[in-house]
Amino acid sequence: MSAREEVLTRIRTALAGQPASGEIPRSYRLVSNRLPGSEQVIALFVDRLTDYKATVHRSDADTLAQTLAAVVASDASVVLPPGAPSQWRDACNGARIDSDLAPLTAGELDGIAAVVTGCRVAIAETGTIVLDAGPDQGRRVLTLVPDHHIVVVHAEQIVMGVPESLTRLDAARPLTFISGPSATSDIEFKRVEGVHGPRVLDVIIVASSSSSLRAEPPRP
């Protein structure tokens, strides 16, 4: 008997008498007792991002263009996803657009200093930003090659935990989970940044129109 056959035999023996199929009970909490976009949730998200050595900027709809322009001011070149809002395009005057019909090559992207994208959801407990290649995010390669990644996160996109974030995601889409700038450590624990992606991460948190800057009571 081969090793493979032995493993399969042990699995069949262990499963003998068990129902062939059935719904798996999922009794864990899917929704947090903190409202998405509340000040408590945002504060925790900011704390995690700062711990990851990301830079956080607070803004609102009226000042977003000004904030974005200031963040990319030192970048020699910028690329935007094809669905970038007009406000981003105005703030990043002269930015290149990664068109669906004529996508930029890896070599062209390597010569671009920064990329600006949105996100699908953000997780406060882990300080994680999730992209799903939506129109305001573009292809995954956009967020891997340029050295500087700027993410625009709207307050209502920030949820407390991972289970709640999964309810907003489509597993069939290409998902990218980002927790701080790209970094790794060698055997001597020396931190090296920019190995697997951008070495600089800026996050612009845009307050919702309903003023997520005020504290909200927890859910019952």
Image (tube, rainbow, N blue to C red):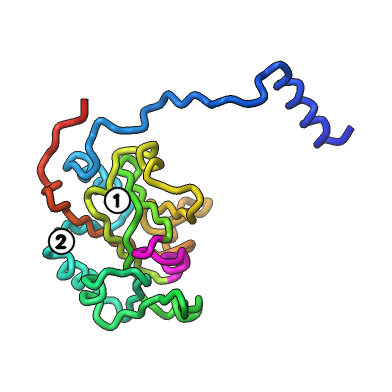
Q: Main secondary structure of the magenta part?
A: loop
**Which of marks 2 and 1 precedes in the sequence?**
1
Of the numbered discs in the image, which one, if any, rests on residue 49?
A: 1
Q: Is residue 140 magenta?
A: yes
The circle on residue 195 is: none
Q: Position of residue 116 (x, y in %)?
A: 32, 68
Task: Name the image quarter holding the C terminus.
Answer: top left
Range of magenta residues: 134-145
Decide which of 81, 40 is in the foreground and name it.
Answer: 81
The number of numbered badges drawn on the structure is: 2
Distance of mark 1 from mark 2, alpha carbons?
A: 21 Å
Q: Nearer the viewer, residue 107 or 208?
A: 208
Q: Amino acid at mark 2?
A: Ala
Circle 2 residue: 61
Please tell me which residue is depicted at 40% across the width and 56% down the height of the picture: 131
The residue closer to the viewer here, 197 or 206, is: 206
Residue 161 percent coordinates (x, y): 34, 38
- Locate residue 98 relative to residue 187 in the image: left or right: left
Does any portion of residue 190 appear in the rendered image?
no
Q: Mark 2, residues whose alpha carbon is within 10 Å: few (<14), some, or many (≥20)?
A: few
Residue lying at 35% horizontally and 53% vertically, measured from the top left: 120
Indicate whether 7 appears above or below 119: above
